[in-house]
Image (tube, rainbow, N blue to C red):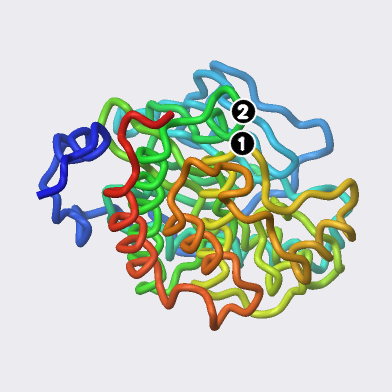
Amino acid sequence: MPDESSFGRWLRNRSGPPDQGAGHAVPKISRPLGAALAKEEPRQTPGFALRPGQVFHHYRLQQQLGRGANATVYKATDETTGGVVALKMLTIADDWPDDLIEDAKLRLLREADAAGGLAHPDIVEVREAGVHDGLVYLAMEYVEGVNLGMHAFEGKLLPPRMVTEMCARVADALYFAHQRGVIHRDIKPANIVFDQRNRRVRVMDFGVARLENSRATRTGIILGSPSYMAPEQLDARPVTAQSDIFSLGVTLFQLLTGMLPFRSDSIPGLMQKISAEPHPPLRVVRPDLPETLSAIIDRALEKDPELRYRNGAEMAQALRDCSRSIDPALS
């Protein structure tokens, strides 16, 4: 039997049996979608802000964890259960046409409902979604850990063998979701958490990108994380499981090299590179890594979705087979 890597031992010792993929029960989204929208109160005015200590719905905010262009995340306490959650508030920008607002909210809630049924040890649970005080919110499992975006730069890279084993776990989680009809749409290092307390890799934000895609399709605006998007996603063509595999290929390349495989100073230039130009071969950047790992990335980053891995399970197996040939002492 091959030597077990430190990350392999780390995963083997994680809480819960190794076959937990079919999973423990996760509460379904607690409010019917139609009721959530029917009971919605008027939209908040521009400049509305939530503060630590404030109660939103039945959640008491503790601290702001992060803020982006389309959402703010708070650590909060569910006052009905006493549990701690990550409360994500989706901000639908004031420049959205009014006739798209209701459709956008309904799409997000439907997607959150589907994501709420993903009971997998490597997927962050969505516990509740709804509309309150005119704001769309998602209450997610609170995870102690560091997102892999912190390890996607030169000088901060994790050992290659650990990276391949982490990405194999992500590929398995994607396969689980895809089998249930849920596409992530925004796989990137920042949406993967290294959960040290529970000894897991956790994938966050399933379905949240649906809101952005809805608007982008209608207006031609590219939102989200275009550096990680597959060609078909940038072109507003149908997004499939293979689109997530492309994004995971970009993520894998960045975590191994500290650089993105496609770079440009402009969105049109970036779209051109992703759609039509080859990425740098992995071994040009990291000649110390095996050719098999370069081949995995090449297949994941095929322009034609049909030429990529058929599913996440297939990519996960390729990554695990490859990891055995990587020196565990290699940094």
Q: Is residue 331 left or right of residue 135?
A: left
Q: Residues within 10 Å of mark 2 (few under 14, many from 20)?
A: few
Q: In the displayed image of the protein, which residue is found farthest to the bottom?
A: 306
Q: Image height check: is 310 above or below 127? A: below
Q: Secondary structure at mark 1?
A: loop
Instruction: Determine the residue positioned at 63% across, 79% down.
Output: 304
The residue to which callout 2 is attached is 154
The residue to which callout 1 is attached is 258
Q: Report the amino acid beneath label 1.
A: Gly
Q: Secondary structure at mark 2?
A: loop
Q: Residues within 10 Å of mark 1 (few under 14, many from 20)?
A: some
User: Of residues 155 and 81, which is closer to you in this image?
Assistant: 155
Q: Is residue 127 visible to the viewer in this orientation of the structure?
A: no
Instruction: Determine the residue positioned at 81% across, 39% down.
Output: 45
Q: Is residue 45 left or right of residue 22?
A: right
Q: Is residue 50 visible to the viewer in this orientation of the structure?
A: yes
User: Of residues 167 and 33, which is closer to you in this image?
Assistant: 167
Q: Report the amino acid beneath label 2.
A: Glu
